[in-house]
Image (cartoon, rainbow, N blue to C red):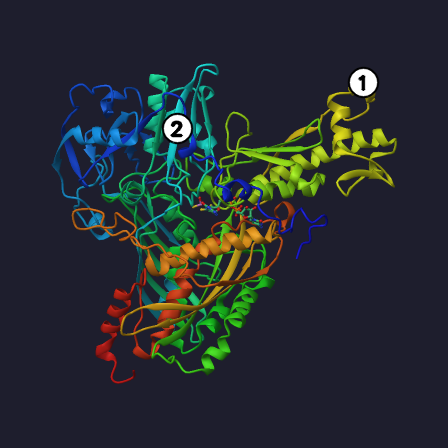
Amino acid sequence: MVKAESGEGIGARVLRKEDARHLRGRGQFVGDIRIPGMLEVAFLRSPVAHAIIRERRKPTGFESSVVFNEDMEGVSPITTRSSIPGYKVSDYPALAADRVRFVGEIVAMCLAANRAAAEDLCELVEIEYDELDPIVTCAAGRSPGVKPLHEEWADNLFLRTSLDQGIDDVIANAPVVVELELSTARQVMHPMEGKGLVAWWDHRAGQLVVQTSTQVPHLIRIGLAECLGIPQAIIRVAAPDVGGGFGYKCMLMPEEVAVAWLAYTRKGAFRWIEDRREHLTAGANARQHEYKIKAYADNRGRFLGLDAEVAIDCGAYSVWPFSACLEAAQAGGNLPGPYDLQAYRCSTFSVATNKPPFAPYRGVARPGVCFAIELTIDAIAKAVGREAWEVRLENLVAASAMPYTNITKKFYDSGDYPASLLQVKQMIGFERIRSEPRRDAKGRYLGVGFATYTEQSAHGTKVFAQWGLPLVPGFDQAHVKLTPDGALEVKAGIHTIGQGLETTLAQIAHEQTRVPLKDIRVTLGDTANTPFSTGAYASRGIVMTGGAVSVAAEIVAGRIKSIAAHLLQVRAEDVSFRDGGIFAGEASVSYEDVGRAWYMRPDQLPDAVDRGGLEATGAYKPQVDTGVFSYASHAAYVAVDAETGLVEILDYAICEDCGTMVNPMIVDGQTIGGAAQGVGTALFEESPYDDNGQPLASTLIDYLLPGPTELPRFRITHMETPSPFSAHGLKGVGEGGAIAPAGALVNAINDALTPLNAAVREIPATPERILAAIAAAKPTLGNVA
Ligand code: MCN
Ligand code: SMO
């Protein structure tokens, strides 16, 4: 394990700087911001899934307090282009124009002194709809002759892709063939704090100021400028404290365009805060995939080929800038997972449906593809009569093969995937479990399941360019400055959304400069005073911005040393950082001495001292544009009650490797938080729609989030294989925890159900689905149970 030499740098388990305010309730979220004269906004949303708007009327006397699409003259819809051939553009207006395409789409914006009054005003607005047939399933959306959701489209797909890496020979000759149909439910992301923003006109700066709960402030400025048709220079986007994002807050939202437009055109202050019902029914969704898989293997279970079709229920519009097709791109590219696969064919269908649009959500497609490939491995193991872990081991990319370019051109930079699997096998006590009875004292069936994945993190320029997206990340930047009193300021355009960058970026700055952590202040996410970053998504923060901080801090450290050397009258090479000061032998100066000398007494410095000053901007991207690959294995041990369908997670083991860890405590927290969301995906969370396109889960009574009583105590061990291709060997970890639980848990459930010959193929694996799987298996059962 990489040790922090000073106890505060890379590798140190220090407490999070941001927690001092959060634990005291002193955070500053959108809900805490008050601007004099500020009005609150409520949105009137469509109660129907698909309709032409025939007429709309404002209540008399409230003409200027109610806004319709036609009032927002000159504002462009949110439009996400992609250069991928065949991709279709959907115009997504902030306020619906002549049509609505999902329940929850905004049809009017109402303003009042407080939210309750604004909601009352919504009730007085009259909208007449001519309802159209909704498209509610992938099957319906793909059926021949279906009327496309966007009238000008030739069919109803945002995109269809196909990739064929030569599988025909395999199909003809493979001794073992396994076929599976799998599906994952539609999910809502549920950060603790919903979306929200305050926008106002700053008369002194001559700027539209937008304080929005976002992961990507610099992107939101670009997006707002495009939609509003105004220069970026008159927009300032800053993110206050953000209470979780998970991908939900990395896109430009219609509400942001609408509220920013209000502030810009009316030169006043306006706020909207999403409530939980809006989040559940109208906020962007994620995860809903359908898989048809044919896997080919030899008699030992060694993969010979994989033939897959993935359909994604993308909702009605493409989000900006990641589009409705990011999910398909990630699914097709990541389905082979950590396995050595030589023949692969995959088609993806990004289907438009009358549901809220699809956005990235922690793991982006990989929780789905991991579930799919991991169930496939277990099915192969069953077919060849071996233990699933053995078949995994047979197929995992070996450490000796690293770096390894896989069949979809992913460059696995480093690591030992088989070792992580063997580690969790040991942790979960596999041999003991197999030596014990398959049922516990209560008669419940016991099972153990595994899943291994790779987490592409900090993927950059080439990857996003390949996806044809309008916005391709390049270098991230950070600014580091020693202040006159010897403290350090770090500024970066990325944002911290709960994942801890305020602390870990400070640790990296400390690593280079040795300025005590308490004297390092990190400012993030404000276009007015931080350098450009595309933001916090794709588990890129620590690699990209961390790298940029490292570059800038190294430059500043060099200049600190040269000024200190002058003050100490030695050569710069003879100066070193130690114990919070700068030493040459036993003589020392403080950081404050250096700061004071440069800023306040330059008359005492010779011209030879580095003129660059005590601040620098660093720019960074790793040596590989395809990102650096973290990975992990998860093992779950479960008990399944065949009478009630209830699952209890008895034990859960994780062995993860994200390269050099900056803060192992934060890495643990990230892994636990992600895995908790993964348990939700596996067992609980689902946002179903009825045949009319009505959302059926509109409260947290209907939409089940796992709480402490449903979650196991995740036991985590780490491996630490530094990436050869990134600064300090860092790899990202923010999404990983969420990727594997569905695969590991459902494999464990199916292992438990083996004596009943039953297998679950849909998640969440609710009691109902488990009982249905058992019932479906009964006819072939005989009296095995
Ligand atoms: N870290 C570390 N050592 C490493 C890798 C990461 O100490 N080798 C730390 C980082 O310093 C950072 C955290 O772990 O504090 C996550 O870093 P990283 O993987 O770089 O991810 P990002 O900073 O880019 O954050 C975004 C990522 C994503 S994409 C989602 S989704 C997600 C996640 O982080 N959303 C989160 N974790 C979240 N955690 C919380 N609490 N809230 C969210 O919304
Ligand atoms: S879903 Mo994370 O914001 O890439």
Res 520 quadrant in image: top right
* Image quadrant containing the N terminus: bottom right
Query: How many numbered discs, if any?
Result: 2
Amino acid at circle 1? Asp
Are there few (<14), some (14-19), or many (20+) residues within 10 Å of tag 2?
A: many
Q: Which mark is residue 130?
A: none
On screen, residue 115 above or below 183: above
Q: Which residue is mark 1?
A: 603
- In this rendered view, identify the residue nearer to me: 271 or 284: 271
Question: Going 25% across and 47% down the picture, which residue do you hit?
Answer: 698
Q: Secondary structure at mark 1?
A: helix
Q: Secondary structure at mark 2?
A: strand
- In this rendered view, identify the residue nearer to me: 377 or 124: 124
Q: Which residue is mark 2?
A: 198
Residue 355 image position (x, y, % from top left): 25, 44
Q: Earlier in the sequence, mark 1 or mark 2?
A: 2
Residue 548 image position (x, y, % from top left): 61, 37
Residue that extends furthest to the bottom in the rendered view of this protein: 783
Question: Going 77% across and 43% down the picture, which residue do you hit?
Answer: 579
Residue 415 visible, this angle: yes
Question: Does residue 321 appear to the left or right of 139 in the view shown?
Answer: right
Are there few (<14), some (14-19), or many (20+) residues within 10 Å of tag 1?
A: few
* Image quadrant containing the C terminus: bottom left
